[in-house]
Image (cartoon, rainbow, N blue to C red):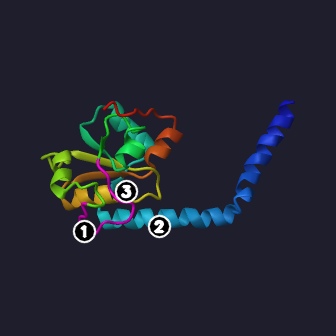
Amino acid sequence: MMRATGIMLAASVVLSGVGCGQNKFQQEVETEKVAVKLARHTTEGKYDLVTTSELAALLADKREMVLVDAMPLEASYKKQHIAGAVQFLFPKSTMDEWDTDETAGKSEADYEALLGEDKDKLVVVYCGFTACGRSHNAALWARRKGYTNVKRYPGGIFAWKGAGMPTEAATH
């Protein structure tokens, strides 16, 4: 029985890519697109990246920081976010000019007020997943506003949950 279950599990893993019409080579093409986009965003934005384990360590050490969730308030943040995160919506596509329509009516001054006066304080931003550009915009605009210690957590809430890390829902 155990062996049959193992074979069925292995077959389902192998067939999971086939059912989607992608093989390992096609999957690598998609991975490459995401990796190159992330690298280009990081270079353009002049910010650093942080992994799930690095962010978890910063939070465990109670490192002073502003942790920004760049996802929509109602559809995402209120349902789940990393403990201690504050919400500020950014669009998925690169925001070259500030657009209050894309930031739920909030201004550059609103974002700066959220980040605080200390331009050297650690600012960590995240969104949903690596291919999502919301966290790029949040990091890019923090740097444009003069913040010097900006990190993007590209794996976002999906990687956080995938690593078994806890989330919380908004209480208000």
| CA neighbours of label 1 inside 10 A, class few (<14), some (14 to 19), many (20+) | few
Please tell me in which quadrant of the rendered image residue 65 appears.
top left
Indicate the position of residue 142 as horizontal and vertical percent values: 23, 56
Indicate the position of residue 94 as horizontal and vertical percent values: 35, 66
Q: Horizontally, is 158 left or right of 151 in the view? A: right
- Relative depth, front residue between 145 and 114: 114
Q: Horizontally, is 128 left or right of 14 in the view? A: left
Which residue sits at x=83%, y=41%?
7
Which residues are the magenta region?
A: 88-100
**Magenta span: helix, strand or loop, mainly?**
loop
Indicate the position of residue 39 as horizontal and vertical percent values: 42, 64
Which residue sits at x=20%, y=47%?
115
Q: Which residue is mark 3?
A: 134
On residue 36, which mark appears?
2
Task: State the CA–CA distance, disc 2 to disc 3.
Answer: 16 Å
Q: Which residue is mark 1?
A: 97
- Mark 1 vs mark 2, foreground winner is 1
Please tell me in which quadrant of the rendered image residue 23 appears.
bottom right
Q: Name which residue type carries label 1.
A: Glu
Q: Name which residue type carries label 2.
A: Val
Q: Horizontally, is 71 left or right of 30 in the view? A: left
- Mark 2 vs mark 3, foreground winner is 3
Q: Is residue 47 visible?
A: no
